[in-house]
Amino acid sequence: MEDVAIVGAGQSVFSRSCGESIRELSFEAYKEALEGLDITGKDIDASVICSAPEYDKQRSPSGLISEYLELTPKPTFYIETVCSSSSTGLRVAWSLIKAGLHKTVAVIGFQKMSELSSRDAAERMGRGGDIIWESPFGITMPAGYALYARAHMARYGTTEEQLAKVRVKNSHYGAANPKANYRKELSLEDILNSEVITSPLKKFDCCANADGSSCIILARGDVAKGITKKPIWVVGLGAATDTMTMAGRESLTGLRCAQEAAKQAYKMAGIKPQDVDVAEVHDCFTVSELLAYEDLGFAKPGEGAGLIEDKETYVEGKIPVNVDGGLLSKGHPIGATGGSQVRTIVRQLRGEATEAQVKDAEIGLVHNIGGVGQYGNVTILRR
Amino acid sequence: MGFENFGTVSFTTEAKVADFITQLEAGKVMATRCRQCGGSYFPPKADCPKCLSSDVEWFEVKGKGKLASYTVVNYGPSGFENDAPYILALVQFDEGIQILARLSRDITEKDIKIGMNLTVHPAKLADNRIAYEFKRA
């Protein structure tokens, strides 16, 4: 059976407030994904539209975006796993192609969060938990991750300074990324002295809400080779879940969904963690990146902090991570994030990541998490 | 009565396990146990996905639990602005039961230690609302 490749990958600039409609925002990513390919919109057989509902007023956005991009009468539908929606979309697109239903599929992720105030957005995120049993206590996304941070610190001695060093790195690379919302370099002091949002996480330990879009175009192998000179092959897919409630979690020192998804993806790709040349991980908070180091096997449990201490996740290090600035710098337009991570890896594997290219990168990994570890996708790509 | 007065902000009312609230009003924090296979649940479940039985009984969450983790929330979402700062905690009890709730207001951050013993109790909130919270054991 033919393999599946990514032929195009694009994203909009991520910003605090884009000043446009979701259809226009989606167009920006779609345009970048199609540029340079020997196809037009007419060659796209289906579209998968990904976002988290309730941030904008539009119901059923798939039809709307499909019309704006003139993808009608091709099928379109909506996929949601909150913050990991667009990597779930990629998984679905891969399956549609593998199953023989379609040859070329566009995965479009978007989110316009600026229509809500920060507190209202936090309330929507709180309802991404269990609305009967946990949201009424005032749980938020950062609070959920703060529970993991505190538990990791208590068990392994991880420090707030080590968490801050993740942001120092990501702000360094974010400053060079023209698509990023936050483009200032931050010092350790800037981060440690920022206000506490939910202890131990401070303002600069947290990514920002943003408006943005992403688009990944996948094609059947034989078709892909005719469309682009640089197809990027999808060689490993892993997906898993954990409980909606925090009460259901068996461990607070790692995300079980990520561990499980990583295991599946490595097995499918036939590689080991040390074979990965460059990774994009879901750093919605600094602690999330540290957990990812361990959940993906880049470090042993409890030893993730050592990687950032030794700068092993910088471009020159053993395993460069989030050298596009990550969610912490780019901002996190929920439904667009997974596609943006994939775009970065595609650029790395094509040798086109001019701002921070990892030398001769051949295998890349994307770790995209929904909610506080409710959903986890790990995707392995190869040039 | 359902979940309409549960917590600072409730988002839904009806549930088969709404009896939980009646018992909370009466001073007890309850979990469910499946009479067929013995599986115990918190949050309470009216149905047992293991054996597909809906023959469940209530039992009280009693005794000391251990603090698994906590966070002091300084930035409350809409509807919770006036509560902040509040401390959310995850506490492990016997029978594999774990509960997320707030720490009682008389516990300050400097008193907190991961692993400390806590008990769970109903908590009356303003405007006739009700929840449960953790107190020092």
Image (spheres, grey):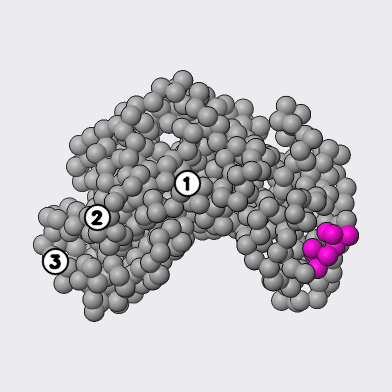
- Residue lying furthest bottom: A73
Residue at 34% of width from left, 36% of height from top?
Answer: A182
The one nearer the camera, B13 or A88, is B13
Q: Mark on residue A29?
A: 2
Left or right: A178 as drawn, with respect to A289: left
Left or right: B50 as drawn, with respect to B95: left
Tell me which secondary structure the magenta stretch mostly adopts: helix
- For label 1, the residue is A118
Q: Mark on residue A40?
A: 3
Measured Cα–Cα span from mark 2 to mark 1: 25 Å
Lower sequence index among marks 2 and 1: 2
Q: Is residue A383 visible?
A: yes
Measured Cα–Cα span from mark 1 to mark 3: 38 Å
Dot 1 amino acid type: Ser
Lower sequence index among marks 3 and 2: 2
Compared with residue A281, is residue A223 higher up or lower down, i.e. above or below?
below
Residue at 68% of width from left, 39% of height from top?
Answer: B87
Label 2 neighbour load within 10 Å: few <14, some 14-19, many 20+: many
